[in-house]
Image (cartoon, rainbow, N blue to C red):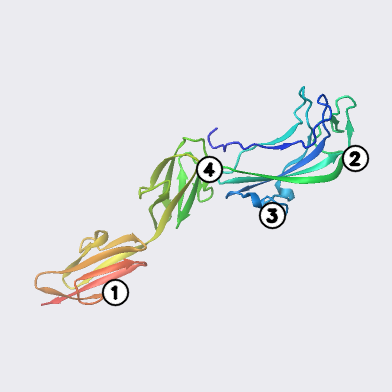
Amino acid sequence: MEGEAPQLEAEFEAPEPAENPEVYGDAQWVKVFKRELNREATLDELLTGNAIVPQNAAEVEVEWEIVQDEPASGGNGRGRHRNGGALRFDTRSVVRRYESYTFTGTYDPITHEALCADLVCAVPADGELGEFIGAQMAAANVAVNAITVTKTGNGTVESTDRLIRCGNKCGAAYNAGTLVTLTATAARDNVFTGWTGACTGAATTCTVTVQNAMNVTATFAPTFVFQAKTSGKGSVTGSFGIDCGRICSATVPRGSAGTFTAVPQAGMRFSSWSGPCAGSGATCNLTINSATQVTANFVKQ
């Protein structure tokens, strides 16, 4: 289903085979802890006490389950423990800790199948949970078909299916091959300047085909008002569409570079700039990092 992560399956094998292939082996209680990481796990990290190994109550995936080696003729599925579940869009590895304890309850006298007091072996009753046997760690590095959005600056990115609304939800899992359209919307006094990653270019809308784990970055920049003025008879022309007298101001992103030229009317000459433009040269080069006003001063020849 769209938006659902691929399934990951891990197995915990019953360690004690039955002495007779027609009956069950000895039973064990198993408790499973699970943690998803946004990076790959390494083999040397799968040690008890390592920070990535899940061990606290909030990370319990399976509270209790009975595991037994099954008869060769087939049993009720107690031969192994299986885990599965939808993964987060940003998951790159799944780490599990399997704790095993002896079963000290009643066995069927013929099949040696564990007979739990609750009839379904969902939780140990008094007298059914024995000593701790040991712990086994396992990990699987995965690549979820997903899009993860990162923002730089102030704005939002939203997918047309609304599974991604970043702001708040900056990623989602998809079926491989799904077409996803993202739209960048700048916040007030900001402008969208472009995409990087799986999306590129400066158009506010981008469509990608989901394959594996994909990263998209949307960059927004603050905007500032640039204003040109004249003192005396003349004009200022240049970047950002400035042609002052007619168009004397523009809103531009921070870091915008512009070139402006003072043009005197007949009988006048350019004398100097005021503001961040300086000197008596008719051309001024500026980088806009705040609200900016320049004045071209003209005097009679």
Which corner quadrant of the image does residue 288 belong to? bottom left
Q: CA distance from mark 2 to mark 3?
A: 32 Å
Q: Earlier in the sequence, mark 3 or mark 1?
A: 3
Residue 189 visible in image:
no
- Residue at the farthest top position: 73
Q: CA distance from mark 1 to mark 4?
A: 49 Å
Q: Earlier in the sequence, mark 4 or mark 2?
A: 2
Q: Earlier in the sequence, mark 2 or mark 3?
A: 3
Question: For the point 9% across and 73% down, which residue is it?
Answer: 267
Q: Which of the two residues, 143 or 136, is positioned nearer the viewer here?
A: 136
Q: Earlier in the sequence, mark 2 or mark 1?
A: 2
Choose mark 4 or mark 2, whichever is in front.
2
Using the image, tell me which numbered label, if any, was put on residue 275: 1
Using the image, tell me which numbered label, if any, was put on residue 172: 4
Q: CA distance from mark 4 to mark 2?
A: 46 Å
Q: Position of residue 108 (x, y in %)?
A: 88, 27
Q: Which of the two residues, 217 or 21, is positioned nearer the viewer here?
A: 21
* Residues at marks 2 and 1 touching, judged by CB atoms closer than 8 Å: no
Question: For the point 81% across and 34% down, which residue is it?
Answer: 121
Mark 4 Cα-neighbour bin, 10 Å: few <14, some 14–19, many ≥20: many
Q: Secondary structure at mark 4?
A: strand
Q: Which residue is mark 2?
A: 127
Q: Which residue is mark 3?
A: 50
- Horizontally, residue 110 falls left or right of residue 78, namely right
Q: Earlier in the sequence, mark 4 or mark 3?
A: 3
Q: Position of residue 119 (x, y in %)?
A: 84, 30
Choose mark 2 or mark 1, whichever is in front.
2
- Horizontally, residue 153 falls left or right of residue 90, namely left
